[in-house]
Image: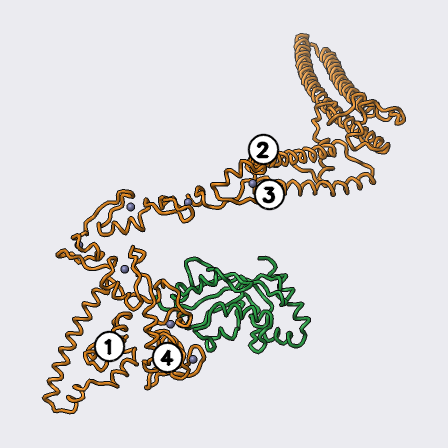
């Protein structure tokens, strides 16, 4: 490209010079670009400078001169490129596709690919369709087109005719002129530049004239960018603090900060045009801006009026629905609260009801087979339903966060729902576990005090007012049920009596056992006495014998010996008699004990039969 | 920014199609920060078996749009010979094939084409051969099936 710039000194190629400059202004001067611009190269080869042609045909000396010339040209080129790059770092080349066009342009000036006014238009040779050079190049680059030595070619993006780029022709020149004359806004318009310029001159405007473009600070040793219009104010690259938001920044940035960034700057509300602090603008347009259209507060009740916020007040004062709205809203809230409370209450009621039913079931179980079956079926219908209700209700209620519900939950966990299978064993368990020490436990539940004697109940006699329980309680809905309940009461009574009898029996046997023990002790004592007696008798006998022998010895008569013997024998017989008498006494004692035991056994048997 | 994005952002294509969408369609960005993914809501054309259905489509623009075609897919399931019968809902639309795509084509034209094939399926470019076959042989049954799918998947907005 820069090469084409050097050629531009030759007057023959003024048109190309113009294009060359145009190219350079809109595309970054990267080396890859000049190589990717085969058409440009093609053109250069087509028109080599005359002096070059001359040197090519001359001898080696002129070749050396040419090399020197070439070296100088390259140095110039490098200098030019580096200075240009510096300025472009501060002000990047204007992207013509992002410009705002001040006046609408004809659709025929629009490239069908980028949908923008043509930028460096080219006309395809075969079909005369026109595109931006970049657009057609991109199109062909993405459709893997084979490289052809005759320059880029591919299908026309519009009509698919195989085509190639034409030379710059008069047609595209006209197009270039027209599109370059389109008036655009300066790309720095957001920074404050109000200039509108022709598109062909926008690069010059930004690069040379626009006061809002950046350039290097004039101050020594300060290479930081500054706006062109501020450049004469001296170095502005020192820190200052924004008065409004207290943010610290360079002086050079301050104006831009006030213009676009400071959160405490005033901006015009897009609706009401009032100046509003930018940080509250959102809130303003949401809640306060008088120009925003809002609907009447009574909209929930059906008012369809929509008006500006400033007039909404006036409307709200006259609109019945708007006046009613807060009242009704409060009422609705109260209703909702009531509903929640009511739901809790009904749950409680349900629990109590089911608990009551369970208690009833325990108190008045039904015994007739038919009734039992009916009952079981009814229970199966009722209790699982209740259980299910309870579960779902608990799930529902755990979501509510009221203490009532916590109470409820405690009730739930403390309460066992009776199931039809467990209700019957429960009642029998209750009876078995009655404390045996209490001879007549109170009936479990509200029972009649004046219950008629068992077995003597006249079923035809009018029932006492307290028995059976009033029909309103449920179970007693028919005479059959009256009888059944009576039967059940009797059964209860019977079981209580039998318990009492059992207890009595146990106490009796205990008593007998104690009595026996005492008798055995007495007998042992008597036995010991008898032994003592017999020992005494033995001792007495032996002393008697000794005394007789002594008397006998004192007599010294042989005849006396016989008489002595007789005396001894008589004494022995007396002793024997005494011993047997003692034995008889003992056996008499034993007999007495036996009689007594027999009498007691007979007594207990009598008691049992009596019971 | 490549020239392609400029066409979406600056070339008024998005602004134009969102403010003034083709009949029966609504277009918006699926995500405000990504201009390459558009969400299209398409009402089944009244004159087609898809009448009453509300279809959600996803239009993904390649980064080098318009040099490469956008990719269009049905997010709402639809019983149609030109739309794959799976969760992808990929479309086979003549102008969306990369060898058929022309950079001058606009999204507006693409959406119009989608509506057109809902009215008249493009049997020659069918991706669901079975459905295409049914369309040709037993049109009544095809209509019934398509309507059932509309009721099942595209009923609510
Ligand atoms: Zn273009
Ligand atoms: Zn063409
Ligand atoms: Zn300017
Ligand atoms: Zn400075
Ligand atoms: Zn500030
Ligand atoms: Zn306002
Ligand atoms: Zn109102």
Q: CA distance from mark 2 to mark 4?
A: 85 Å
Q: Could you tell me which residue is drawn at 25 percent across and 57 percent down?
A: A212
Residue A322 x, y percent position in the rendering: 56, 38
Q: Which one of the lettered chains is coloured green?
A: B
Q: Residues within 10 Å of mark 2 (few under 14, many from 20)?
A: some
First reached walking from the N terminus: tag 2 or tag 4: 4
Residue B131 picture location, percent across and down: 62, 73
- Picture coordinates of residue A78 (x, y %)? 17, 72
Residue A210 position by quadrant = bottom left
Where the C terminus of chain A falls, by quadrant? top right
Residue at numbered disc 1: A17
Snapshot quadrant of residue A605: top right
State the mark number for residue A302: 3
Instruction: Find the distance from the CA under tag 4 to the CA under tag 3.
Output: 64 Å
In this figure, which residue is indicated by the disc labeled 4? Answer: A123
**Label 4 secondary element:** strand
Is A485 on the left-hand or right-hand side of A177?
right
Give the drawing colour for chain A: orange
As measured in the structure, the alpha-carbon distance from the residue carrying label 4 to the one carrying label 1 is 20 Å
> Under tag 1, what secondary structure?
helix
């Amino acid at each position: 490209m820069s090469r084409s710039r050097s050629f531009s000194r030759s007057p023959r190629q003024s048109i190309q010079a113009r294009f060359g400059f145009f190219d350079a202004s809109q595309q970054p001067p990267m080396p890859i670009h000049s190589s990717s611009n085969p058409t440009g190269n093609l053109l250069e080869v087509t028109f080599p400078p005359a002096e070059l042609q001359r040197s090519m045909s001359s001898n080696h000396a002129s070749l050396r001169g040419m090399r020197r010339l070439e070296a100088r040209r390259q140095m110039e080129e490098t200098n030019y490129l580096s200075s240009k790059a510096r300025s472009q770092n501060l002000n990047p080349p204007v992207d013509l596709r992002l410009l705002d066009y001040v006046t609408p342009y004809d659709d025929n000036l629009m490239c069908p690919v980028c949908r923008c006014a043509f930028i460096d238009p080219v006309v395809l040779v075969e079909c005369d369709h026109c595109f931006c050079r970049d657009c057609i190049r991109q199109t062909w680059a993405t459709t893997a087109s084979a490289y052809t030595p005759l320059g880029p070619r591919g299908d026309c993006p519009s009509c698919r005719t195989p085509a190639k780029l034409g030379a710059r022709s008069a047609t595209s020149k006209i197009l270039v002129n027209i599109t370059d004359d389109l008036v655009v806004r300066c790309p720095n318009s957001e920074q404050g530049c109000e200039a509108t310029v022709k598109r062909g001159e926008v690069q010059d405007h930004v690069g040379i004239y626009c006061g809002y473009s950046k350039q290097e600070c004039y101050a020594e040793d300060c290479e930081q960018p500054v706006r062109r219009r501020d450049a004469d104010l001296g170095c502005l690259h020192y820190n200052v603090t924004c008065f409004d938001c207290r943010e610290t920044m360079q002086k050079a940035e301050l104006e831009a900060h006030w213009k676009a960034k400071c959160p405490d700057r005033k901006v015009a509300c897009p609706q009401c045009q009032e100046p509003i602090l930018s940080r509250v603008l959102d809130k303003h347009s949401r809640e306060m801006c008088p120009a925003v259209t809002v609907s009447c507060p009574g909209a929930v009740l059906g008012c369809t009026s929509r008006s500006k916020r400033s007039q909404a007040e006036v409307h709200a004062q006259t609109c019945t629905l708007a006046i009613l709205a807060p009242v009704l809203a409060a009422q609705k809230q109260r209703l909702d609260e009531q509903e929640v409370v009511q739901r809790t209450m009904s749950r409680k009621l349900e629990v109590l009801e089911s608990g009551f039913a369970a208690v009833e079931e325990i108190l008045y179980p039904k015994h007739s087979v038919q009734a039992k079956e009916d009952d079981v079926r009814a229970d199966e219908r009722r209790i699982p339903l209740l259980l299910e209700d309870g579960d779902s209700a608990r799930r529902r209620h755990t979501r509510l966060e009221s203490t009532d519900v916590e109470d409820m939950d405690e009730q739930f966990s403390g309460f066992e729902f009776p199931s039809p299978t467990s209700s019957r064993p429960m009642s029998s368990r209750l009876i078995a576990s009655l404390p045996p020490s209490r001879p007549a436990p109170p009936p479990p539940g509200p029972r009649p005090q004046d219950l008629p004697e068992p077995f003597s109940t006249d079923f035809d006699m009018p029932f006492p007012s307290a028995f059976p329980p009033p029909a309103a309680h449920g179970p007693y809905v028919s005479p059959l049920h009256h009888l059944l309940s009576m039967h059940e009461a009797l059964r209860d009574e019977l079981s209580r009596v039998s318990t009492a009898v059992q207890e009595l029996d146990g106490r009796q046997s205990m008593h007998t056992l104690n009595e026996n023990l005492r008798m055995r002790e007495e007998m042992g004592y008597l036995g010991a006495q008898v032994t003592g007696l017999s020992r005494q008798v033995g001792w007495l006998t032996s002393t008697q014998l000794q005394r007789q022998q002594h008397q006998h010895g004192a007599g010294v008569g042989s005849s006396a010996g016989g008489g002595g013997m007789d005396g001894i024998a008589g004494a022995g017989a007396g002793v024997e008699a005494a011993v047997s008498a003692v034995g008889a006494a003992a056996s008499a004692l034993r007999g007495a004990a036996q009689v007594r035991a027999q009498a007691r056994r007979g007594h207990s048997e009598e008691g049992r039969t009596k019971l | 920014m490549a020239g392609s994005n400029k066409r979406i952002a600056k070339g008024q294509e998005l602004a134009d199609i969102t403010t003034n969408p083709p009949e029966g369609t609504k277009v918006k960005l699926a995500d405000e920060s990504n201009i390459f993914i558009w969400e299209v809501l398409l009402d089944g054309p009244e004159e087609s078996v898809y009448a009453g259905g509300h279809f959600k489509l996803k239009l993904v623009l390649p980064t080098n749009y318009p040099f490469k075609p956008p990719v269009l897919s049905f997010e709402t399931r639809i019983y149609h010979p030109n739309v794959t019968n799976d969760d992808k809902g990929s479309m086979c639309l003549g102008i969306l094939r990369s060898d058929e795509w022309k950079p001058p084509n606009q999204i507006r034209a693409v959406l119009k084409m989608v509506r057109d094939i809902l009215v008249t399926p493009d049997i020659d470019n069918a991706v669901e051969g079975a459905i295409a076959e049914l369309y040709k042989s037993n049109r009544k049954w095809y209509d019934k099936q398509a309507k059932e799918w509309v009721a099942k998947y595209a009923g609510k907005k």
